[in-house]
């Protein structure tokens, strides 16, 4: 594990304490609060994850919030849903770095994916979520 400016780095992945989540109609942007020029995006329609350079301009987000990580994604009929960590608490340390327990999570989905569903598929989706 390399250490660069107090940011743990494992192979090519950096670990950050907090992320700013910017929600757009067709894209979720995750920016590091520690390194604002470091960011990645997830497209909720197809699940594609891309590293961003920080100089892209996507306009004004519909919602901005702080999250503590991306726990995963799940692909359903309505598109890809992203599970983000919304709260945490420190439970210890490992090699001098804090270890956190996830306290709450939230699914973020795109409303665009549900536009082409039948009424039966929408009802099943509502029951699942």
Image: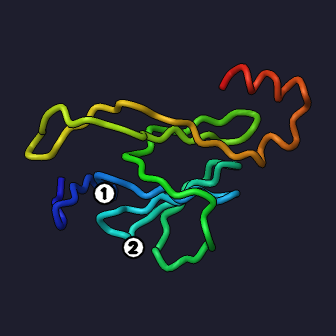
Q: How many marks?
A: 2
First-in-chain label (2 vs 1): 1
Where 25 sits versus 117, above or below? Answer: below
Residue reaching furthest to the bottom: 55
Q: Nearer the viewer, residue 69 or 59?
A: 59
In what element is the residue under mark 2?
A: loop
In what element is the residue under mark 1?
A: strand
Residue reaching furthest to the left: 96
Where 48 sits versus 71, above or below? Answer: below
Cα–Cα gap, marks 2 and 1: 13 Å
Q: Which residue is mark 2?
A: 37
Q: Which residue is mark 1?
A: 14
Which image quarter: residue 57?
bottom right
Which image quarter: residue 98?
top left
In the image, 112: left or right of 3? right
In the image, 38: left or right of 26? left
């Amino acid at each position: 594990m390399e250490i660069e400016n107090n940011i743990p780095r494992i192979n090519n992945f950096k670990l950050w304490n907090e992320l700013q989540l910017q929600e757009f109609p067709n894209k979720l942007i995750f920016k590091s609060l520690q390194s604002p020029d470091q960011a990645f995006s997830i497209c909720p329609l197809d699940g594609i994850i891309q590293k961003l350079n920080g100089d892209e301009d996507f306009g004004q987000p519909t919602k901005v919030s702080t999250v503590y990580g991306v726990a995963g994604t799940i692909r359903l009929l309505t598109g890809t849903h992203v599970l983000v960590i919304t709260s945490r608490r420190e439970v210890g340390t490992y090699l001098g770095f804090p270890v956190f327990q996830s306290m709450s999570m939230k699914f973020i989905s795109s409303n665009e994916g549900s536009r082409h569903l039948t009424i039966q598929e929408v009802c099943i989706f509502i029951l699942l979520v």
